Image: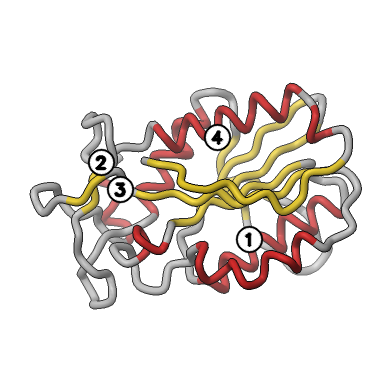
Amino acid sequence: MKIIKIETLISRGSFAKTKFWANARKAICTAILAVDHPIGSGKFTIFPESGKKRGKGNGVKPIKDLFVKKLVKSGWKSEEPLKIASEAKPGKLDAVLYGKAGTIAVEWETGNISSSHRALNKMVLGLMKGLIQAGILIVPSRKLYKFLTDRIGNFTELEPYLDVWKALTIGDGVLEIIVIEHDAESESVPRIKKGTDGRALI
């Protein structure tokens, strides 16, 4: 898997300068780059088929699960709840790292663009309440997006709203978007299954 862009929305205060954050960010990037398909191939090759029609294209959850498993092996926790509201439950975070310097949350987008906005806002609220010190959202590029589940959240559709998050007055913390893309395209590789069937990849 390739990282084609890291968009920093917020990077302020002492936490952004800690070794803990630098090491965690490096671990996140390393885990992304290590995601491959087919597994063991050493690169991420996508079956080049549009995901617009039912049963076509490639699923997303199996890709995310491979990434999260790589982080868990280095001490991260998966499916962690973030208690940012007393009544509404915003859902669990894909991966969380706890440390003396703070807490880091990562979300890998598997839903539509509305889900991407919710994920960012959930982490923003966590930053505002001091529950996390850094939040990362991982989304596909437009080039990868067209081969995945239809309407999956992607960077192109988030881009018009970046200034909203950049304008937030959070004095200490980090908020970033990492944009990912496949290494190659080939009809000789299997499709990545959609839904629960995708667990066969893992």
Tell me the number on the disc at residue 199: 3
The residue where tag 2 is placed is 37
Q: Nearer the viewer, mark 4 or mark 1?
A: 4
For the residue marked with disc 4, what is the amino acid?
Ile
* Mark 3 crowd level (few <14, some 14–19, many ≥20, 10 Å Cα): some
Label 4 element class = helix
* Mark 2 crowd level (few <14, some 14–19, many ≥20, 10 Å Cα): many
The residue where tag 1 is placed is 119
Foreground residue among 35 and 177: 177
Q: Nearer the viewer, mark 4 or mark 3?
A: 4
For the residue marked with disc 3, what is the amino acid?
Arg
- Toward which corner of the image does residue 168 lie, by quadrant? bottom right
Tell me which numbered mark, 1 or 2, is placed earlier along the sequence: 2
The residue where tag 4 is placed is 28
Say if residue 93 shows up in the picture. no
Foreground residue among 111 and 202: 111
